[in-house]
Each structure stands twice: as structure tokens, then as C-alpha cells.
Image (cartoon, rainbow, N blue to C red):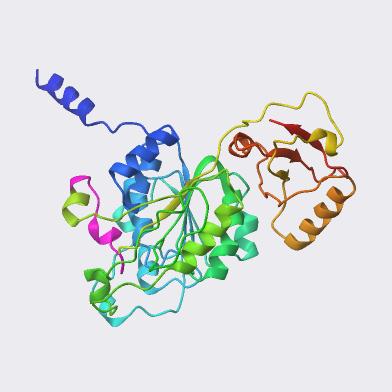
């Protein structure tokens, strides 16, 4: 009888699986904190995850304890003593602030943390070629960007890290809040949270009892990138957690809290093909366009490198025919354009080895 009772209770307490995008979105709306990203790995189809900008290593520790991913990548150019104490393979001469010395943790290995995960640490900037070359395209399920928060760095990070994502994976990032700026026109972009006051943790670490710094640079970089990816929709957390609410779900508040309550943004990379195959090829000329079409879109895959040069090359190709266009749509997936087609766009695929306009058709 006792054995039966234990079995029933264990079954009732089992976490629900998060297999689909809709299930994950519903879960995060019910638990709107970045802390719960770990549950998408623990209870979802994700095995390989990454944090870019590890700092003290507290959020990585949270992930390793709560999610236990098969592989966990960390990118941090300046590992401090707190991170080195947690993960000695990260080495740096950078000193921890005096106020943190009393909080110095013991190593993950000594506490049995990360022992079931393959850990790989990059002592490098997020855009160092050593990092970009080491991670294969479409090989990571979840990526969290929390490194440099200036506009230029965030804008440059988004595309190469998005390419690392497997279809169906999540690209996310910290510090998605603003003061009074107007958001851009992209899917999900209208609702940007306001930056609020620093946390008690931030005040204790010298930030002051005032409103947190404006993160419009992050928001603008993300939204400009989304404007070039109209197949994507952005979502964000709220960070309304408390020590009690996290404890109820078995999470450590001290690993989750930061200087701010700044929300995180996240997008889902589309999965499989949604465009039917072309029945026959046709030259891209005026006869392939209809009076009702609003725009001509040029789709192509590209390697993040000679960006301006590729734009110029494809512009010259389209000018060989009467392929007038309003703007380019850049993507590394040709199979994500259904939202555009639904809005009356003409879709034209231009491949890297095709000197013509490729395939033109109305969807």
C-alpha cells in the first residue's frame, strides 16, 4: 500500500513536457522570468545550450543545476575570481571586488554540479572567430546573450548566433527594457517593458536606489534585426519573481537575482519548410508579377562576412531582368516566408550559384 502511494505521488508530481512552441510560450507566460528558460531544457526537446556573457557564473550554475543539459557552452572574455572559483578551467587574473570575497563559492565539481553535462568554456569575446568557428551551424538548442550591451555589439551578435540555432531553437537575451523611446515596426515589438529600479542586490553592490540604466541600445539592435526577419516574433519576460516564488519551484533566488529586474527577450527559430516546391522555373520578369502584389522579396542564404558586397552582387543580378524590388529580405532559411506570402508578397529565391533571378512565383 505504501509503495502504491509513493508511485501515485511521484506520477502526480512529474513535470509536464514542453514539446511545442505553443506549449513553451504558454509556460513562459505563466512563469515570466528568465529563470524558467532552464525548464525549456529540462522539460523540453533541448539538449545543447549556451550562455554568452557568464560574469560570476551564477546563471550558468542555475542552468546546470535545474536543467542539466547534455552540453553547456560558456563564453566569457574576462572571467573573474567568482567564476574561476566555480569553474577553475576559466582562468583570469581579474580580482573579485572585496565585498564578494566572503561570498566566494566552492567549485561546481566539488558540489557535484555539471557532472552530467559536457562543459565547454571559451575565454573570448562573443564575436571572436575562435568562438564562431567552433560552434557548428544549427547545432545549439538554446542561446542566451548577456555580454556587451552596447548597440554595435548586440547588432553584430544576433545573426551569427541565430545561425548556430537548430530549427525550433530559442535565441534569447538579457536587458530588454527602455525609457520613453518608440519601438520599431516588427512582430511583437510594440510591447517593450519599462526599465525599473535596481534590485536590492544591485543596491548592495553599489548601483544606488534609483532607476536602472536605459537599455534602448539593446532593444533597438534586436528590433532592427527583427525588421530584417519578418518571419520572427519577439516575446519577453517580466521578471516579477520573488525568493518565495522561485523556492516553490525548487530554484535558488541567489543564482537568479541580478543588479536589475530587466526583462529578457526571446525568439523561436522556425522549424521545417512551409513553402511548397516550385512546379516549374520561370524567368523573373514582369509577366511573373501580378497587379495585386505589394512587394518583391529576394530570399537568399548568405554567410556573415562581406555583407555589403553580397547586397551589391545580388542587386546587380536582379537588375539583369525587370526584377524591380522594394527591399531585400535576408534569411539563412528559405523556408520561412509564409507570413510574407500571406501579406501578398512575391517570393523570389536567389541562390548563391544562380546568376539569374532564380524562381519567381506567387504563393
Extreme residue in the front direction: 291
Who's the residue at 65% across and 63% down the image?
A: 129
In this image, 352 relative to 254: left or right? right
Q: Is residue 254 magenta?
A: yes
Image: magenta residue range: 248-260
Q: Quadrant of the N terminus?
A: top left
Main SS, magenta residues = loop
Extreme residue in the right direction: 320
In this image, 73 relative to 42: left or right? right
Whether residue 55 is visible to the viewer of this picture, yes or no, is yes
Q: Is residue 318 magenta?
A: no
Q: Nearer the viewer, residue 244 or 124?
A: 244
Extreme residue in the left direction: 1
Who's the residue at 51% across and 70% down the image?
A: 77
Q: Quadrant of the C terminus?
A: top right
- Give the quarter of the image for residue 40: top left
Who's the residue at 57% across and 43% down the image?
A: 231
Instruction: Count every numbered label the image shows and give the total.
Output: 0
Residue 97: image location, x then y, percent? 32, 80
Who's the residue at 82% across and 25% down the image?
A: 280
In this image, 197 relative to 220: left or right? left
Q: Nearer the viewer, residue 140 or 86?
A: 140
Residue 251: image location, x then y, percent? 25, 50
Residue 89: image location, x then y, percent? 46, 64
Amino acid at each position: 500500500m505504501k509503495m502504491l502511494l509513493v508511485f501515485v505521488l511521484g506520477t502526480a508530481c512529474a513535470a509536464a513536457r514542453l514539446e511545442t512552441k505553443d506549449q513553451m510560450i504558454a509556460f513562459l507566460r505563466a512563469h515570466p522570468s528568465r529563470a524558467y528558460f532552464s525548464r525549456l531544457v529540462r522539460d523540453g526537446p533541448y539538449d545543447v545550450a549556451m550562455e554568452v556573457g557568464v560574469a560570476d557564473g551564477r546563471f550558468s550554475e542555475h542552468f546546470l543545476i535545474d536543467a542539466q543539459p547534455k552540453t553547456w557552452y560558456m563564453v566569457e572574455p574576462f572571467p573573474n575570481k567568482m567564476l574561476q572559483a566555480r569553474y577553475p578551467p576559466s582562468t583570469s587574473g581579474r580580482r573579485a571586488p572585496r565585498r564578494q570575497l566572503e561570498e566566494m563559492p566552492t567549485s561546481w565539481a566539488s558540489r557535484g554540479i555539471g557532472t552530467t553535462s559536457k562543459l565547454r568554456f571559451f575565454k573570448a569575446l562573443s564575436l571572436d572567430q575562435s568562438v564562431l568557428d567552433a560552434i557548428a551551424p544549427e547545432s545549439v538548442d538554446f542561446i542566451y546573450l548577456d555580454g556587451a550591451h552596447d548597440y554595435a555589439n548586440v547588432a553584430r551578435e544576433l545573426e551569427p548566433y541565430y545561425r548556430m540555432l537548430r530549427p525550433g531553437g530559442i535565441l534569447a537575451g538579457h536587458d530588454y527594457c527602455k525609457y520613453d523611446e518608440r519601438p520599431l515596426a516588427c512582430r511583437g515589438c510594440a510591447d517593450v517593458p519599462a526599465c525599473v529600479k535596481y534590485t536590492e542586490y544591485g543596491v548592495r553592490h553599489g548601483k544606488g536606489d534609483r532607476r536602472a540604466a536605459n537599455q534602448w541600445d539593446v532593444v533597438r539592435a534586436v528590433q532592427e534585426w527583427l525588421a530584417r526577419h519578418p518571419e520572427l516574433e519577439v516575446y519577453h519576460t517580466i521578471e516579477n519573481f520573488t525568493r518565495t516564488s522561485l523556492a516553490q519551484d525548487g530554484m535558488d533566488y541567489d543564482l537568479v537575482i541580478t543588479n536589475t529586474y530587466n526583462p529578457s527577450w526571446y525568439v523561436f527559430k522556425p522549424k521545417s519548410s512551409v513553402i511548397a516546391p516550385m512546379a516549374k522555373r520561370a524567368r523573373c520578369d514582369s509577366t511573373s508579377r501580378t497587379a495585386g502584389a505589394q512587394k518583391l522579396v529576394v530570399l537568399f542564404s548568405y554567410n556573415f562576412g562581406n555583407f555589403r558586397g553580397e547586397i551589391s552582387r545580388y542587386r546587380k543580378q536582379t537588375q539583369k531582368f525587370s526584377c524591380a524590388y522594394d527591399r531585400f529580405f535576408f534569411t539563412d532559411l528559405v523556408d520561412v516566408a509564409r507570413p510574407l506570402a500571406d501579406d501578398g508578397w512575391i517570393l523570389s529565391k536567389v541562390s548563391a550559384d544562380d546568376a539569374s533571378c532564380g524562381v519567381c512565383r506567387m504563393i
